[in-house]
Structures are given as structure tokens and as C-alpha cells.
């Protein structure tokens, strides 16, 4: 808000998380004794409505238009269709099952999203592209909701959050495996400065070598022959005007021609 810019942030994580919190809130309303699910996810939905609204306000025009289309499709059309179909076309316990499967599938997808960063960490052997707190809170969130699901015997909550707990734990293990091998900002800056100094030294050595080669080449060049010298003087003399030609010594010209032959 201070910068009045979204910078390099994308809107899709906020939009999909808003859908997830809204679906889980709806699931809690359908579930008997689902007050905790409603309060937690309802609060999350309110926060993400604020996030999405601020993103749409400060996003650049092309990104704003694209994000508004996604909000209309995902958070309004899709969510509205799920609620309408569940309330109008489905009855009994099938309602809870339908919404539970949708929530679980979406939750697994959100937990699996950081796997791309995990692959990069293994390939680069660096945790630069995997934020610690994102992995930590994924681990913590999955563990808490899995414990809750075991207590209330709710598979729709337990399965996706159990998967999230395992994935979060795996990310934390990778983080601590490659943390020491990742260059810090200070080390990275020092490395870059050292590399620049080395490049300057190499370039300076090449430049000095080239200068020495040119100097040696200039010293080793053969002097022009007498024929060439007097030929150039003859051409220069003949190119002068008649008035200036008289000022040259004729004997010098004849002497040069004889020496040239």
C-alpha cells in the first residue's frame, strides 16, 4: 500500500486461496459441529477478500484486467455454481461429500504448488528459491488440521492436510540440508566483487600484452627502401602546380631518379 504497486507479485495465489477458504467455510456450514471450520476459514476468506481487492486496486492495467477475469470465473461463477448445485440439485449427506471432495482436491493442489520450488532447490542445491516461513507454516498448518481431523474423524480434512504436513516436513528437511551450501547476500556480493577484480586484472594484462606486441611490431617493421622514398618524392613533386614546381631543385629530382634505378 505504501508503494502503491503490486511489484512482481501475482494475483493467482490470493484468488485460489480465496476460493479455498470460501469452499471450506461452506463445508463447515454443511457439516454438523463445523463451527471451528467456519470461523477459521471464514476469517481467512475475509482477509483474502481484502488482499484481492488491494491487488486489483494497485495492479497494472493489463494484470488488473486479467485478475478481474479470474476473480469473475473462479470466485464468482465457479463458487456460485458449486453452492447453487449443492443446495438445489443435491440432497442429504451427498452435499457434504460433494463439497468435501472439492475442498480436499483444491487443498492438495495448493499444498503441492511449492513442489516446483523443491525441484529447483535439489537441482541448484540452494534454498534461495524456497522461503523458510512458507514451508514452516505449511508444515504447521497441515499438522494442526490433521490432528483436528483425527479427533473429529473427518477424512476430508485429514487426508489433504496430512499430505500437506508430509510435504511441509520434506521441504523443511531440504531446507536444512542445503541451507549451509546456499550463498548469503554478503558472500554473494563479495564473490561478485572478487570476480570483477579478477576480470579487470585479466583485461589489463591482455591490454598490456597487446601494447607490447604493437610496440615490438612497430620496432621490427623494415624501413622503406630508397626506391620507395624517391618515388614518393617524385610523385609529390609532379603533383605540385607549375608555380611551385620551380621552387624545387631539379638536381635533387635527377639524383633521386638515378639512385632509384
Image (spheres, grey):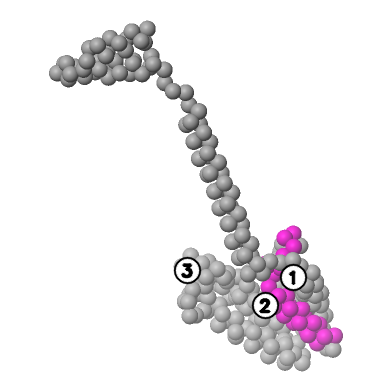
Quadrant of residue 123 within the rendered picture: bottom right
Q: Residue at x 42, y 21 (%)?
A: 224
Q: Are marks 3 and 2 in contact (CB under 8 Å)?
A: no
Q: Position of residue 154 (x, y in %)?
A: 82, 83
Quadrant of residue 12 within the rendered picture: bottom right
In this orientation, does residue 85 appear? no
Left or right of residue 112, residue 202 in this image: left
Residue 179, numbered label: 1
Q: Residue at x 66, y 81 (%)?
A: 21
SS of the residue at dot 1?
loop
Q: Which residues are magenta?
A: 123-150
Left or right of residue 93, residue 8 in this image: left
Q: Position of residue 67 (x, y in %)?
A: 54, 70
Q: Residue at x 74, y 82 (%)?
A: 141
Left or right of residue 221, residue 206 in this image: right
Q: Position of residue 258 (x, y in %)?
A: 33, 8
The kind of secondary structure the magenta stretch mainly shows is: helix
Q: Residue at x 34, y 15 (%)?
A: 231
Kindly report the distance in space between the C-alpha atoms of the residues bearing marks 3 and 1.
Answer: 35 Å
Amino acid at each position: 500500500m505504501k508503494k502503491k504497486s503490486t511489484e512482481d507479485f501475482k494475483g493467482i495465489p490470493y484468488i485460489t486461496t480465496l476460493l479455498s477458504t470460501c469452499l471450506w467455510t461452506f463445508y463447515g456450514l454443511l457439516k454438523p459441529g463445523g463451527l471451528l471450520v467456519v470461523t477459521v476459514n471464514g476469517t481467512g476468506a475475509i482477509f483474502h477478500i481484502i488482499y484481492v481487492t488491494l491487488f486489483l486496486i494497485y495492479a497494472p492495467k493489463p494484470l488488473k484486467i486479467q485478475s478481474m477475469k479470474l476473480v469473475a470465473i473462479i470466485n464468482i461463477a465457479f463458487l456460485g455454481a458449486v453452492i447453487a448445485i449443492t443446495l438445489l440439485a443435491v440432497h442429504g449427506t451427498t452435499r457434504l461429500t460433494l463439497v468435501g471432495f472439492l475442498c480436499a482436491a483444491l487443498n492438495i493442489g495448493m499444498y503441492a504448488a511449492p513442489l516446483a520450488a523443491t525441484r529447483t532447490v535439489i537441482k541448484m542445491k540452494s534454498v534461495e528459491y524456497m522461503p523458510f516461513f512458507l514451508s514452516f507454516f505449511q508444515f504447521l498448518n497441515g499438522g494442526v488440521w490433521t490432528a483436528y481431523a483425527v479427533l473429529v474423524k473427518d477424512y476430508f480434512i485429514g487426508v489433504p492436510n496430512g499430505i500437506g504436513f508430509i510435504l511441509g516436513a520434506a521441504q523443511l528437511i531440504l531446507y536444512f540440508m542445503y541451507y549451509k551450501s546456499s550463498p548469503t547476500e554478503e558472500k554473494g556480493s563479495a564473490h561478485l566483487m572478487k570476480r570483477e577484480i579478477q576480470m579487470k586484472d585479466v583485461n589489463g594484462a591482455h591490454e598490456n600484452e597487446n601494447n607490447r606486441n604493437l610496440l615490438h611490431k612497430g620496432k621490427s617493421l623494415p624501413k622503406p627502401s630508397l626506391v620507395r622514398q624517391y618515388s614518393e618524392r617524385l610523385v609529390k613533386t609532379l603533383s605540385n602546380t607549375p608555380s611551385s614546381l620551380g621552387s624545387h631543385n631539379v638536381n635533387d629530382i635527377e639524383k633521386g631518379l638515378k639512385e632509384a634505378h
